[in-house]
Amino acid sequence: MGKIVIAIDGFSGCGKSSTAKAVAKKLGYTYIDSGAMYRAATLHFLNNHTVLTNIKEVNNALDSLKITFHFDPEKQTQETFLNGLNVEQEIRTMRVSDYVSEVSKLKEVRHSLVAQQQKLGKSKGVVMDGRDIGTVVFPHAELKIFMTADLSIRAARRQKEILEKGELIALEKIKENLGERDRMDSTRVESPFIKAKDAIEIDTSLLEFDDQVEQILSLAKEKI
Ligand code: C5P
């Protein structure tokens, strides 16, 4: 059975990560959360007080940035490490969410992280989710999915996820953050978040989680 690359791009909070993890588990593939890489880079920049308009500082921060992952397919958990430190919880905080789109629009950041993502997916057998996976990172991915969902539904899902981690954030605040990130990610100059021409669109607003996973699995099986 051949191995393929599955690129899942989509808006924040439409269930990309949990769907991608479940698909990876079923296929015995590796899961890579590219958003976690932009979040970890953002945390690193915040910790170092990197001035985003100072290219030298940005490049220095990128040179001292090492992101690694541990994906447990059985538990369907993923942990992100920044220079050896587990930052999985910290990169999901609003402090990072509010700043990540500013960092991810920088050309230097994108070039560095895209190169790392391409390396991680080189041997195929990978499910990667993000905003530019089907357009820039793996333009020749065998299967490309573009996930969407209604903003209110996405905000409610994200609130529940954050609450499960012990933080209560007002729905309006989450909605505002998601909407603003959607706007910035879609309008940036450097690899804007757009649907790849050959991506299959799945609207998850009214879909059950298992159906989402099944749809992608059956599309994947046609390609494997
Ligand atoms: O997927 P998640 O919501 O965690 O992504 C956080 C942010 O990282 C996005 O809002 C976007 O600014 C950035 N991102 C990106 N390209 C990717 C993945 C994420 O620019 N491939």
Image: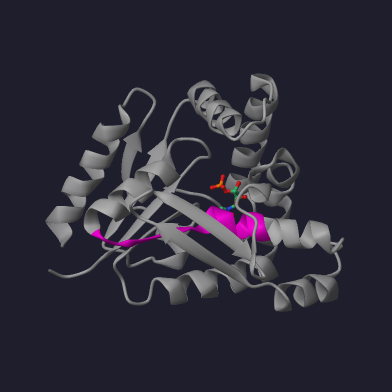
Task: Tell me if residue 191 can be seen.
Answer: no
Task: Tell me if residue 136 can be seen.
Answer: yes
Residue 129, percent across and down? 44, 53
**Colouring style:** one colour
198 or 127, which lies in front? 127
Quick check: 15 above or below 103? above
Residue 47, percent across and down? 82, 59
63 or 191, which lies in front? 63
Q: State left or right for residue 12 relative to residue 100.
A: left
Residue 37, percent across and down? 58, 60
**Is 134 part of what is drawn in magenta?**
no
- Which residue lies at the image location 15% right of the left edge and 62% below the top edge? 224
* Magenta region, residue range: 28-40
Q: In the rendered picture of this protein, how many numbered marks are placed on residues?
A: 0
Quick check: 126 above or below 25? below
Quick check: 131 above or below 181? below
Q: State left or right for residue 16 relative to residue 209.
A: right
- Which residue lies at the image location 84% right of the left edge and 64% below the top edge? 48
95 or 150, which lies in front? 95
Please state, as top left, top right, bottom left or bottom right, where the N terminus lies in the image.
bottom left
Instruction: Give the quarter of the image for residue 162.
Output: top right
**Is 36 part of what is drawn in magenta?**
yes
- Which residue lies at the image location 67% right of the left edge and 34% below the top edge? 177
